[in-house]
Image: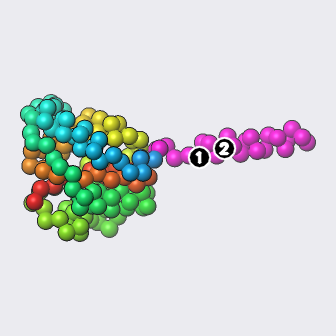
Amino acid sequence: MKTLKFLIPITLIVFLSYCDDDFSPAPKEPDKVLLLELVNEYRTSGCNCGDDYFPPTTAVSWNDTLEAAAKAHSLDMDENDFFDHTGSNGSSAGDRISAQSYQWNTYGENIAQGYTSEQDVIDGWIKSEGHCRNIMNPNFKQMGVATSGSFWTQVFASH
């Protein structure tokens, strides 16, 4: 009987360890300076997005309003357990940016899940042709990034 009492807690611990989510949480507060530095390193150097070369372009600046739009989408994905550019209420990135009173004339959005560092998420976006194109788009002048749980959202725009 002593063996059985000992095995039940161990079995429960082993079972619970396999119930964890597949994705580790992103940093609570991503490092804005580092994210901007990593993005602008690519923008000012140029890079390949898939088979297409994007020449050097101007650096983007951080925008807190775009960060708020990114945060709203990361929270939505986290709280409603989905992963998509369309919000749970049917909103687009443009809708979310406008809801923050940013008067945009062009925008782009990158999303990611499961990355645990700024370097890893930027590396992941650069390896994805569409996300890379957003990072390298010379029409974008500002960006914001936010996380919630394991979700990341990066928003680019210009006035």
Question: Residue 15 — which label?
Answer: 2
Q: Residue at x 14, y 32 (%)?
A: 45
User: Relative to residue 91, is residue 52 depicted above or below?
Assistant: above
Q: Is residue 86 visible?
A: no
Image quadrant of residue 41? Answer: top left
- In the picture as drawn, the residue positioned furthest to the right comes out as 1
Image quadrant containing the C terminus: bottom left
Question: Could you say whether the residue bearing mark 2 is in a helix, strand or loop?
Answer: helix
Q: Residue at x 19, y 43 (%)?
A: 135
User: Relative to residue 41, is residue 8 depicted above or below?
Assistant: below
Q: Is residue 89 visible?
A: yes
Q: In this view, does 129 lie to the left or right of 137?
A: right
What colour-coding does the image apply?
A: rainbow
Q: What amino acid is found at the position of numbered circle 2 in the picture?
A: Phe
The stretch in magenta equals: 1-24
Foreground: 42 or 88?
Answer: 42
Which residue, given by chain and number where applicable, does mark 1 sit on? Answer: 19
x and y percentages locating residue 112 in the rendered image: 33, 46
Question: Could you say whether the residue bearing mark 1 is in a helix, strand or loop?
Answer: loop
